[in-house]
Image (cartoon, rainbow, N blue to C red):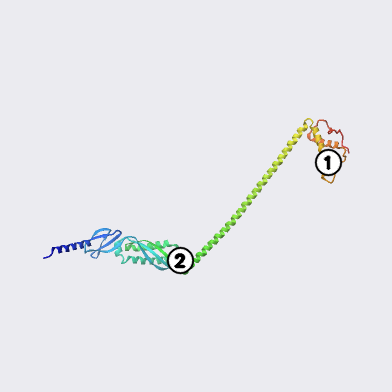
Amino acid sequence: MFDLSNVAFIVFIIAVVIAARSIKIVPQQHAWVIERLGKYHATLTPGLSIVVPFVDRVAYKHLLKEVPLDVPSQVCITNDNTQLQVDGILYFQVTDAMKASYGSSNYIVAITQLAQTTLRSVIGRLELDKTFEERAFINHTVVNALDEAASNWGVKVLRYEIKDLTPPKEILHAMQAQITAEREKRALIAASEGKRQEQINLATGAREAAIQKSEGERQAAINRAQGEASAILAVAEANAEAIQKIGTAIQTQGGMEAVNLKVAEQYVNAFGNLAKTNNTLIVPGNLTDLSGMIASALKIVRGTEGGSTPGGDGGGVGGFGNSTPRR
């Protein structure tokens, strides 16, 4: 007789095993490929799934996150026959779990090898100097070539980045010498430009100073001329006013007598100063006939007035009587 407890235990164990093989829990950002009797059946998405035990099995498990792949360093030859050590990194993502499982036996190795061969091809078309300047072009070309081929493997190549470009030591020394020479050249050019600008500034300053100086001298000359003209005009106006006043005073009562007295006084003073200012003494022909000389001067005064004076023609000066000059 069979023990019912043992049978129940065996049934329980079988049920647990069947449940464990039937229930599949797929994590987030993962995809599992199910084969039924050795043939592709379905792709399980994240969450709880039920499969047929002992018939279905999980053949492949894929990570759907973006994966960085370090591409091994390799030596590339540029267009100008220079060896260049290139090291890069590749970013890819599985987009189709079924193609990633059956499209290639190892898509990671395939992507790595294709990245290396494509990189050697791109570097071979560029010269050494261009490889440092065209990094973006190199990365873009490698990504396009890989993405086209990897689409059959269910993989999307997102980007490729060159981590390091290392030329030989001799090339590095030559490049450093070239950079040093270029910097020295720029320094000399900058110094010469500075000197040139300095000379231009000095010449411009001297020219401006000369212009300002000439303008100042011109303005000073104009001011002096205007001042002298104003002084001459003021003196002329003062003389005119004085002459006008003298003429008005002569026309008044006793004016001519005052003129006679003034002329006689100046004549005597001038005659007395002749011996003081010069060794040569000039005297009139007849020193005794002073009244005749004064009368001659008064005739000139009357002639400028255009008329007669009180006292009649040939009037005496002060106490002098009418007389004619003696020859």
Q: Are marks 2 and 1 in contact (CB under 8 Å)?
A: no
Q: Which residue is mark 2?
A: 128
Give the secondary structure at mark 1. Answer: helix
Q: Is residue 235 left or right of residue 44?
A: right
> What is the distance, in whole Å, between disc 2 and disc 1 at their CAs?
114 Å
Q: Amino acid at mark 1?
A: Gly
Kindly indicate the quadrant of the structure image that contains residue 160.
bottom left
59 vs 300, left or right, is left
Label 1 CA crowd tier, 10 Å (few <14, some 14–19, many 20+): few
**Residue at the location (45% across, 66% down)?**
128
Comparing 154 with 251, the one in front is 251
Q: Nearer the viewer, mark 2 or mark 1?
A: 1
Looking at the rendered image, the quarter that the C terminus falls into is top right
Return the residue nearer the eye: 156 or 25: 25
Coordinates of residue 137 in the picture (x, y in percent): 42, 61
Residue in the image at 71% along x and 39% along y:
234
The location of residue 209, given as percent across then percent down, is: 62, 51
What is the x, y in percent for residue 11?
Answer: 17, 63
Within the image, what quadrant is residue 224 found in?
Answer: top right
Q: According to the image, label 1 marks what residue?
A: 272
Residue type marked 2: Leu
Instruction: Write down the quadrant of residue 320 in the picture.
Output: top right
SS at circle 2: helix
Residue 91 is situated, as x and y percent measured from the top left of the image, at: 36, 62
Quarter of the image with the N terminus in it: bottom left
Q: Is residue 302 visible?
A: no
Taking the image as shown, residue 156 lies to the left or right of residue 269, namely: left
**Disc on the earlier residue, 2 or 1:** 2
Q: Is residue 171 left or right of residue 111?
A: right
Q: Residue, x 76% and y 32% (percent of image)?
A: 249
